[in-house]
Amino acid sequence: MKIKFIHFVFSLFILALLASIVKAGEPVTDFRIKLKLKEKKSMLISLETNEYKFVNPMPSGGFLSKPGVTKKRKEYKVNPWRMTALGVAGAGVFTGLHIYYSNTWWKDKRHFFKYAEDGFYARNMDKASHIYTANVFTVLTATGFEWAGVSPSKSLLYGAITSMAYETYIEINDGFAPNWGFDWVDMGANIAGALYPFLQNEVKPFRHINFKWSFKPEWIKKKTSSGDDLLDDYTNMTFWVSVNPMIVLPKSITNGKFYPKFLAFALGMSLQNASHVTGSTNAQSQWFISLDWDINQLPGKSDFMKKLKKLLNFYHFPAPAVRISPSGIWYGLYF
């Protein structure tokens, strides 16, 4: 009796359901049922008589993408006027440096091309100069190419090619100069410096290791007044390798609450009693440890500010330091 009653109630339910979906003048078989899957709430399946339709409103990026949000990819197009201006500026800089080198390093009569290992010269500090110069040249020219409308990846490639081409030109001219020679170690330093921005771009920890340079305030005034070589005076320069502790410290410490992100440490190298004129017989290397300012970690997230900070970060701004060799000296601010 109880089973018959359940069948009767179920039959009434089916009839009521059919009556609610049947329209006047339409057959009972023409109906639509919509089901929403519980597992994927955004997936809607429409089932029609003799026809099946699956509607997938999911964004193309997959389940992790936000519905209705499509990330627009930036398009790069070379600006002819900017590229022309970049070429003119580059030709002007090249010509100016060529004239300068011709009147200083290469001013004597040229001899035959030769190779020379100049490791003794400047106590190898010139190798640090080659790495630093090629590094700056790559980033600076890459910034120029990007300003002209070239994509960042291609700009970095063109910047590295330009840097290595120019440094090779310098080295070949050294090979013809009577007091110098083509040095393969110098070339290795040039290549390392030119390619280092690629390593920083691909391996994130290396972004916290940067090459820097600083000089004493009286250097420019002294050299311009005496007419001596301005660029080859390592006694008034210091080259640095700056390391931000963010490379090893956990984010819980370097998130700004316990450690300022812009504070780094640097190892510097300079010289005493060295000159390309008088020689380096009595030259002595000096080593420093200093605080450093990682300009890349300062505020400013716009594209312009990021590029400006990267260029400024090639300079070691004055900071407290200590000379650790050949003797200990403390500096309140070392330039």
Image: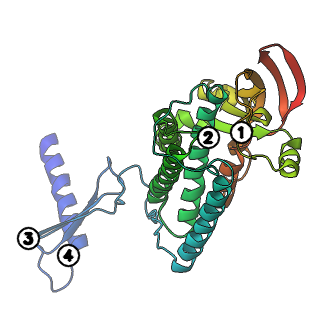
Q: Position of residue 205 (x, y in %)?
A: 54, 33
- Element class at badge 2: helix
Q: Which residue is mark 3?
A: 50
Q: Residues within 10 Å of mark 4 (few under 14, many from 20)?
A: some
Q: Which residue is mark 4?
A: 22
Q: Are marks 3 and 2 in contact (CB under 8 Å)?
A: no
Any part of residue 330 in sight: yes
Whole-angstrom CA distance, mark 4 to mark 1, is 85 Å
Any part of residue 256 in sight: no
Whole-angstrom CA distance, mark 4 to mark 2, is 82 Å
The quadrant in which the C terminus is found is top right
Q: Residues within 10 Å of mark 1 (few under 14, many from 20)?
A: many
Choose the circle earlier in sequence order: 4 or 1: 4
The nearer-to-camera label among 4 and 2 is 2
Q: Position of residue 77 (x, y in %)?
A: 46, 73
Q: Which residue is mark 2?
A: 132
* Figure quadrant of residue 246: top right
Choose the circle earlier in sequence order: 4 or 3: 4
